Amino acid sequence: MIHPTAIVDPEAKIGEGVEIGPYSIIENDVHIGEGTRIGPHVVIRQGTTIGKRCQIFQFSSIGEAPQAVAYKGEKTSLIIGDENIVRECVTLHRGTVKGGGKTIIGNRNFFMAYSHVAHDCQIGNQVVLANGATLAGHILIEDHAVIGGLAAVHQFCRIGTHAFVSGVTGVVLDIPPYMLAAGSRAKLFGLNSVGLKRQQFREETIRALKTSYRIIFRSGLTLEKAIKKVEESEIFRIPEVEHLIGFLRQTKRGICR
């Protein structure tokens, strides 16, 4: 159902069962999947693809041009998967040519009010951005990560799977998977044990990750020596430990410790 006050470009592709609320604006070159609900006063700009059964609340700005000085109006895109919840006043921006041209958001994510995703970010599945959380450009967030309210993440950082970033935290380095980070400049405070238990991780896996944390971040070894020690230990057979080590080895900005 499309409200009579909504402005929908005839070139936009609207799926079956889509609802578009009063005074919303849908531009051309927009694709909206079946069953998605768009609230009132939402703006969806050209180059945006939205999956099935998403919910987008009032005053959100979806697919706006990137806030990048180098952007000169090139055609870029924002791709959003299925069953995402986008609350009030959220801003999700398109990519830039320099960054690959695409901002990509997976499935079943939750963007709380006033959160922001900048150009060229890649967000996995079941990620939570709490109220006012802000992502700069070119950020990678793996599945199941949680970013607390008013946290800010520097461009080109990575947030690992099942990591928890506390509210009002400034992230300037990569946050490893499964870890808890907090502080005006993020520091690690151990394993995200509560989150892992809620996700029903096995006790053996949690113990192995705790051991990995102690070796890598609290033993006094250099990062390279600590990684090698974990790789040579029995716990490296645990898939989550292997993922943690792979994440550390791929860092470009450096690892939060």
Image (tube, grey):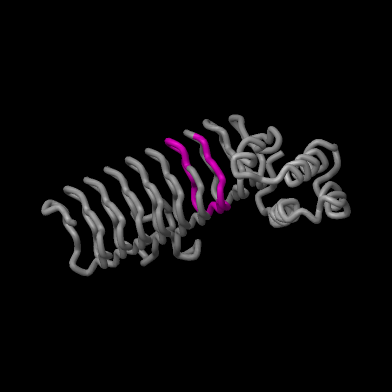
* Residue depicted at 65% across the width and 50% down the height: 253
Residue 32, percent from left and from top: 31, 62
Instruction: Locate the C terminus by quadrant.
Output: top right
**Which is the main secondary structure of the residues drawn in magenta?**
loop
Residue 26, percent from left and from top: 24, 58
Residue 235, percent from left and from top: 82, 50
Report whether 169 appears left or right of 242.
left
Report whether 27 appears left or right of 197.
left
- Is 40 drawn above or below residue 105 in the view shown? above
* Residue depicted at 40% across the width and 51% down the height: 84
* Residue depicted at 61% across the width and 30% down the height: 183
Residue 161, percent from left and from top: 61, 49
**Which residue is nearer to you in this view: 195 or 117?**
195
- Is 82 drawn above or below residue 190 in the view shown? below
Q: Which residues are magenta?
A: 129-148
Q: Quadrant of residue 172?
A: top right
- Is 221 drawn above or below residue 17 in the view shown? above
Residue 169 is one of the magenta-drawn residues = no
Looking at the image, the residue that sits furthest to the bottom is 11
Report whether 57 appears left or right of 226.
left
